[in-house]
Image (tube, helix red, strand yellow):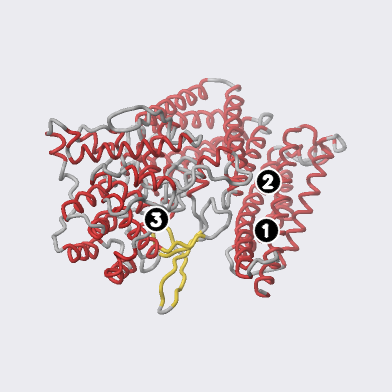
Amino acid sequence: MNWFQRISKIITGVLLAIAGLLFILLDDEKYTLLLAGIIIYLLFCGIKMMIYYLTMARLMVGGKSILYKSVILLDLAVFTASFTSLSPLYLILYLVGIYIAAGVLDILRSLEAKKLDAPEWKIKFASGLFSILLGIAAGISGLLFNYPEISAFIYGGGLIWSGIAGIASAFRRTKSVYIQ
Amino acid sequence: MQKDFHYYATYCAAYLAGYTHNECMDICYSAQLVDHCSATLLRKIKGPVEAATTQLQLELMDIRTDIAGLQDITRIWASFHFLPFDLYAERKWAPKMYLKKYRLICNTNSDLLVETVKLAKDKGTQAAGIAMHVLADTWAHRYFAGTPSFVINNTNYYFYEIIPDGDGFTERPVKFIHNPSAPDDHENGIYVNSLHQNSETSVMNLGHGRAGHLPDYSYARYRYLPAWGDYEEIVKDNPSDYMNAFCQMIYALKYLHGEEPSFEKNRYDTEAVEPWREKIKVILEKRQTDACEDWKKLAEEMSGNEIEDFDIGKYQSEYTDSGDRDSTYLGRFIAAAIAQKSMVTYHIYKSGSKLAGVSITKKSRKGGSDK
Amino acid sequence: MKKGVPVIEEKNEITRKIRRYRNTLYITGSGISALGLWSALRLVLGLMISPQTLLTPEITENISGIVGVLVVLVAFALVIAPLLGLYLFVGKKAREEGLGKKKNSFYIALIVLLASLHIFSIIYCFMGLIGIIPFMQDSIIGLIVSMIVDATAAVTLGEMCMSAVMIRIYEKKNTGN
């Protein structure tokens, strides 16, 4: 990572931590804000991928896979948008699901980093495991106790943790395979 | 290509072209130095970083892939390791964005190669060495581009190694893994390549990373579908390509030495190679990931002189301690590298692409500027 | 065959086309499996969370608590799981043929069946869009994107069918040459 990427990671980490704090402190509007953020992000990714397919990937062997991914992302964005009228409980479950999925991805990436003997793998693994456990705890508290505020609190705490982990990882060296 | 060809085989080619032992050592050292002269090394010897001819793995890890970073990468890799074949190539229904990368695909016997060799004329052994590195790499790295591009440099499951079997050949699917600590296993067809990354500008999609080191092994024969090829299969025959590279190097070096009046495309000095052809063929076809020992033995047999191993620190103190750095070995290498980079960047820019940055023509002691 | 074109050149061209169609089969096979999985997940979540966008008001009024869960389970067992199985089967066979492994012509008929279902779904969504099915009008953007997804799936299945048929035609031509 160079200084530019490190600074980006630090800024992202700080923003995540602030988002987590807001999520704990705000009332009902936090769900709408968070959903809006996720929808915009998914829409952006889906449209970006679609444009990439139309301009570049359609000329590539096997490029159609990019088209399918973009369509699924767009559909996911619209599907997420249909949740705005839901009760907070279902919203939080949905968010928790995404959080657990992100944790699983983190663990897979950490195992990849471990294969490369990169020192950062431990932090990434811990971060991923923490995300999964947090997601499960948030889901259980919401379902079993029907108390979405606890889930929201745990989720907000999880965002703050992700922010801190991101800032910490900005100071780590990353490793990958490059062929010269 | 690797040290076995860039260092020892270049020595052999220079010797067969009529250079003395010392001149051959200068040329082959310069050819190999192209794979080591990074920004890190240049900073260490307090040289100009714009003369970098390669980027180390550590530098690539840290590199930014915004516009400026990509231009930096393309300037280096397209100028020295993946010389573009046709900067005005066309492809039906392709938008300009795609064409810019498509036109950077490397192949042999290009107009840029002729310019590269002519640029080295009367510029000394260091320039000759750089030109030979570029020439040799056009054979090994053909069909890949010296810019990060998923749509140009990607490969897929359709990748088969062709292995000699008696009088014929057998085929075996190549298995790629991403574990750098495991060496390439050519017995079982398991090779390391770079990670699959959908991102267009990921450095994983730079050059031949997605094909691993196969293009750099002289014994390798394989067929695959290049991402840009519209399902046209490429059959790469490295033993044949490397032999052509060797013969073309001799011809180019004879031109630089003054024995040939001009340097033209598609010409190879097969006569000079004839007495050594069978021995070279054996080395090229031998299934080994490093042929340095064999090439070194051949070089010593050819010239009757001992060939010292490549030592990256050989000329560094001469450069750092000298009052007139430009006249030192590294000083002349740096000048030739800057000239080569400027020339290629200028042509890429002239073709309407800013992938290698902006090029302005400026009169200077060392040639055109690339900034 | 073009006049004056040597047989070897035509054979190379046919081989290239077979390669292209095989790769298309592999990609479309993976794509249809992914689309099928996502559609199934979407249906299940949709039934659980916002059944009003999928079912009539008369049905949704009577769904609550354990009845709702039962409805989801029955729908899954009778409709979603078999459909998902179809998608995954078709995807698997297409990928296998794309990799040059065993060929199975039965799945081509299933491709046609699935494509028909998607075309029917497009028509159904369109009827919801123009108000013929009023209960669906709560989510216009959702309907439009559903139509896009269905159209993509239908086109993908169409490409898959065409690739499978063309491979058979060209392979016959190749052996003939």
Q: Which of A31/B110 is in front? A: B110
Work out whether B241 lies above or below B344: below
Q: Mark 3, chain letter?
A: B
Q: Quadrant of residue C129?
A: top right
Residue at the farthest front position: B261
Q: Label 1: which residue?
A: C85
Q: Secondary structure at mark 3?
A: helix
Q: Label 3: which residue?
A: B139
Work out whether B135 lies above or below C127: below
Q: Which of B88/A39 is in front? A: B88
Check if mark 2 and mark 3 are on a common chain.
no
State how far apart marks 1 and 2 are (Cα). 15 Å
**Label 1, residues with CA under 10 Å away: few <14, some 14-19, many ≥20:** some
Residue B223: x and y in percent read 48, 63
Q: Mark 1, chain letter?
A: C
State how far apart marks 3 and 1 are (Cα). 49 Å
Q: Secondary structure at mark 2?
A: helix
Q: Quadrant of residue C81?
A: bottom right
Disc number placed over residue C44 in the picture, else none: 2
Residue at the farthest right position: C132
Question: Disc 1 or disc 2, which is closer to the eye?
Answer: 1
**Label 3, residues with CA under 10 Å away: few <14, some 14-19, many ≥20:** many
Question: Disc 2 or disc 3, which is closer to the eye?
Answer: 3
